[in-house]
Image (cartoon, rainbow, N blue to C red):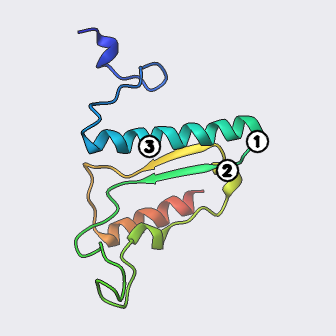
Amino acid sequence: MDPAYYVLKEDESPCIFGPIEKQRWSYACANQLIERLIYAEDAETGLEFTIVKPFNWIGPRMDFIPGIDGPSEGVPRVLACFSNLRNPARANGHIFNVGNPHNEVTVRHLGEMMTEVKNSL
């Protein structure tokens, strides 16, 4: 097999998707489509944009709608409580994949890391 099809370099590799009957690939195609549309709108009209694509943000007992299918107190999405973009111009034109599938931390450690990042800006 040609290495160009399995050694992925973000700036050079061809975009390869799997079979259409696999749900994972429809998600990937939808992401690719919306990002291309946003980039095209930017090129055409100067649209200012920032895309944030979170993954692995939910831990045990954190996937609920407060008061509907979980407790009425608290907020289930921990990073949404700790972070927001206060300087939109700095993030304009960028896409952020936020998360790490191989990294789990406690809520306390996450808060400490977010505070450290904020203080370093």
Circle 1 or circle 3, nearest the eye: 3
Dot 2: what SS?
Answer: helix
Instruction: Decide: is 28 above or below 82.
Output: above
Pick whichever, 44 or 80, lies toward us: 44
Residue 68: x %, y % from top left:
33, 86
Mark number, residue 30: 3
Q: Quadrant of the N terminus?
A: top left
Mark number, residue 46: 1
Residue ID for mark 2 = 90
Distance of label 1 from label 3 (alpha carbons): 23 Å
Find out whether the residues at labels 3 and 2 contact each other: C-beta distance under 8 Å: no
Q: Earlier in the sequence, mark 2 or mark 1?
A: 1
Q: Residue at x 26, y 31 (%)?
A: 19
Q: Quadrant of residue 76?
A: bottom left
Q: Pointer 1: residues within 10 angstroms few (<14), some, or many (20+)?
A: few
Find out whether the residues at labels 2 and 1 contact each other: C-beta distance under 8 Å: no
Circle 3 or circle 2, nearest the eye: 3
Dot 3: what SS?
Answer: helix
Q: Pointer 3: residues within 10 angstroms few (<14), some, or many (20+)?
A: few
Q: Quadrant of residue 88?
A: bottom right
